[in-house]
Amino acid sequence: MSAEITIHSSFTGGNIEITGTSGDDIFLRNQIRDTMEDWFYWAFCVEGAQGRTLTFHFDKKWIGYYGPAVSHDLNRWHWLGSADSSSASDSFSYTFAPEESRVYFAHDMLYHPARFEAFCKEMGLRTEILCLSRGKRPVPFLSFGEGAETILLTARHHACEATGNYVLEGVVEELLERRLPGFRVVAVPFVDYDGVVCGDQGKSRAPWDHNRDYDSSKEALYPTVGAIRAISRREKIRYAFDFHSPWHVGGENDRVFIPLKHSASQEQDARFSEIFEKSMTPEALPYHAADNIPPGWKWNLAETACFGNYMYHTAGAELAFTLETPYFRAAGKAFGQGEAVETGRCFARALRRYHGL
Ligand SMILES: [Zn+2]
């Protein structure tokens, strides 16, 4: 590698460590930071490699079915493409065109606060400050509509899980265009805001992560979660949805699904899931109610402290759960930014129907 090439993580969401170089081969690994188990998120930038072909080698198969997500502006992303999309891999090669002076590569199609701000501006909305994060950063939130009841939307309780933001954007867009009468909508798109900015994994963060900060017998550790809990005390939350991404690849992680928690709301959950399945359009990432995961299944601990359980048991919401949207493909359809936003629109249409409109 020549001296003028720079590989770095100095941007929103950056996460990489260079472990070695040999000619045009670069050896990398992702930074786990304070996550208490192995995880897969990474994102880096290459500058000054115009006209060169470099091969990037990871220590683990942390590259998805279609190779890395590639961007020139951290906003629009496409898959590099992979000759074999049947499995994850640990390396990829990239030929930098003569004009490609700066290229971003990431595990998945990142969604940054700048995109959410631009979206709100386009919609004629302005975000406000929810609170200061532990890192003293102002955390944005959005609210619109008037009413006695509230729809609460959240994403990035786990910092690296960007797919949920695309879905949340689609939900907001649809609810703006066709309001639910009598409802205020509150959206907190980046719950672990520091983690999103710093490029942390965020999942299983020590001593516990943001989605485990909902033990109602304790004060919240994270100011954002404290502020969300305060909203749920002030307002009458009827619907509360938390948008996540699952694990890296394989099995249920290649499908859109709801990990069902409390069995108390079994009937409502089943009715919503059925309507959601029927509301899917061909442009969305497919969702099948049969892919939902029952309470207690493998890792899906039913009564653990989390946003969904808190909103259901403590805040008294009628419907409160997590929706998981995969990083790479859902039921065989490749993840795209537009497809994920459309999935959110379908979700909001399903909520309207569930609500009886
Ligand atoms: Zn998650």
Image (cartoon, rainbow, N blue to C red):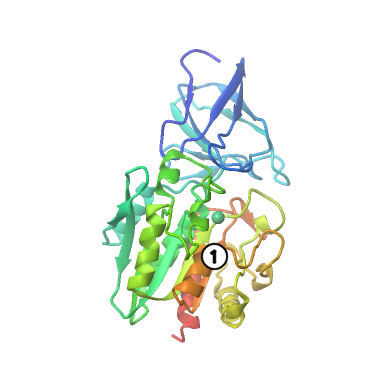
Q: Residue furthest front?
A: 217
Residue 65 x %, y %:
66, 45
In depth, the one of 332 and 308 nearer the eye is 308
Q: Under tag 1, what secondary structure?
A: strand
Q: Horizontal placement of 290 versus 341: left or right? A: right
Q: For the point 47% across and 32% down, which residue is it?
A: 103
- Judged left or right of residue 8, residue 40 is right
The picture places residue 106, in percent across and down from the top left corner, at 53, 39
Image location (x, y in percent) of residue 140: 32, 54
Q: Position of residue 63 (x, y in %)?
A: 63, 40
- Report which quarter residue 300 is drawn in: bottom right
Return the residue at label 1: 322
- The CB of the residue at mark 1 lies under 8 Å from ligand 1: yes
Q: Quadrant of the N terminus?
A: top right
The number of discs equals 1
| Residue at the spot 42% in from the left edge and 54% down from the top edge | 191
For the C terminus, the image quarter is: bottom left
Three-letter code for the amino acid on which mark 1 is drawn? Thr
Rendered-image quarter of ligand 1:
bottom right
Please tell me which residue lies in front, 7 or 259: 259
Dividing the picture into quadrants, the one containing residue 282 is: bottom right
Q: Is residue 132 above or below residue 4?
A: below
From this view, report whether residue 301 is shown above or below residue 221: below
Observer able to see residue 176: no
Residue positioned 37% across, 46% down in the render: 134
| Residue at (64, 41) in percent of width and height | 38
